[in-house]
Image (tube, rainbow, N blue to C red):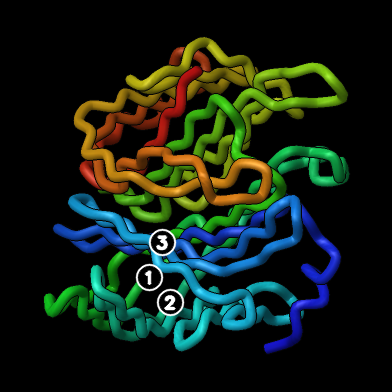
């Protein structure tokens, strides 16, 4: 692990990583991160979310360190990386211990932000570290043992100043078809005094990547708390959200984790993907993650 010179002079800044794990009947995500308020105060945190509960554990910033390639994060006795994680969380609300190992990590081909990654004044940046990978190991969560045996994982990250005021995010890789994963993010993006609706989406189907994004001509037909329809050229993606189970999480606003949002880590949804009039797939999942924050 290296020192934290990257964050030395930053203010009004956050960075967080999202490590999701799911077995046949259980889903859990760990969100390690840091935030720096406008007056320069810094701390680190780990958030934990399951279908039925969520937790936030704060740490001193000095408990946080990160590798030079920024793919391994350490917060006190907890380590998160693209190879796996080691957990040792304990406070009055939660005890979480264990070790998980990842294999067959699947990064995307190019940066999901496209040309927008070069614009330093963007409010929020997004990255996808693994669309799909295998998870093996054991966790103990509040004295309950959870075993992952060739189960599913997903990793992404966000950084910048604030989450968008209005946005939708959906992610799922728990399908009956192997090597299939979907992630969509739609948000109101402030830009040079104006605002536009931006979209980044990956449809990874049977090992082939399809990208539908603002920078390659995607059209937003609709999106709300019930799902979305987006289209780019011959391709159309429809997602119908069926059953919700929201839990509260903290989200950044001006660098500080002072905003409450609600995430469904494991809800039911239906996914349809078309090329022209041909239906490429019609898939359902009970382990879809979904957030919708309206105006």
Mark 3 surroundings: few (<14), some (14-19) or many (≥20) residues within 10 A: some
Residue annotated with mark 1: 134
Mark 1 surroundings: few (<14), some (14-19) or many (≥20) residues within 10 A: many
Q: Are marks 1 and 2 in contact (CB under 8 Å)?
A: yes
Residue annotated with mark 3: 47
Distance (Cα) linking label 1 and label 2 = 5 Å
- Residue 142 position in % (x across, y down): 17, 74
Q: Residue at x 28, y 67 (%)?
A: 151
- Residue 39 position in % (x across, y down): 75, 55
| Residue 102: assigned label | 2
Q: Residue at x 48, y 59 (%)?
A: 18
- The quadrant in which residue 218 appears is top right
Distance (Cα) linking label 3 and label 2 = 20 Å
SS at badge 2: strand
- Between 241 and 265, the residue placed more toward the observer is 265
Please say if 53 is above or below 184. below
Please say if 239 is above or below 182. above
Distance (Cα) linking label 3 and label 1 = 22 Å
Q: Residue at x 74, y 18 (%)?
A: 195
Please say if 158 is above or below 294. below
Quarter of the figure that contains the N terminus: bottom right
């Amino acid at each position: 692990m290296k020192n934290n010179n990257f964050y030395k002079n930053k203010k009004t800044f956050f960075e967080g990583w999202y490590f999701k794990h799911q077995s046949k009947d259980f889903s859990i995500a760990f969100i390690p991160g840091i935030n720096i308020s406008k007056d320069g105060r810094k701390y680190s945190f780990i958030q934990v979310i399951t279908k039925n509960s969520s937790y936030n554990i704060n740490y001193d910033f000095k408990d946080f360190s990160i590798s030079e390639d920024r793919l391994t994060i350490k917060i006190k006795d907890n380590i998160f990386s693209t190879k796996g994680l080691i957990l040792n969380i304990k406070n009055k609300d939660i005890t979480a211990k264990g070790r998980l190992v990842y294999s067959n990590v699947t990064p995307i081909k190019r940066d999901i932000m496209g040309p927008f990654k070069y614009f330093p004044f963007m409010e929020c940046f997004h990255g996808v570290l693994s669309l799909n990978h295998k998870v093996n190991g054991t966790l103990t969560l509040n004295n309950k043992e959870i075993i992952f045996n060739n189960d599913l994982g997903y990793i992404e990250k966000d950084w910048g100043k604030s989450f968008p005021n209005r946005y939708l995010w959906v992610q799922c890789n728990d399908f009956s078809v192997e090597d299939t994963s979907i992630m969509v993010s739609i948000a109101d993006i402030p830009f040079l005094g104006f605002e536009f609706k931006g979209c980044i989406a990956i449809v990874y189907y049977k090992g082939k990547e399809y990208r539908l994004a603002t920078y390659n001509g995607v059209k937003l037909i609709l999106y709300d708390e019930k799902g979305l329809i987006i289209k780019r050229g011959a391709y159309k993606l429809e997602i119908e959200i069926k059953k919700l189970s929201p839990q509260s999480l903290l989200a950044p606003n001006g660098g500080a984790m002072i905003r409450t949002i609600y995430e469904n880590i494991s809800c039911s949804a239906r996914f349809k993907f078309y090329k022209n009039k041909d239906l490429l797939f019609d898939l359902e999942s009970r382990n879809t993650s979904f957030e919708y924050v309206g105006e």
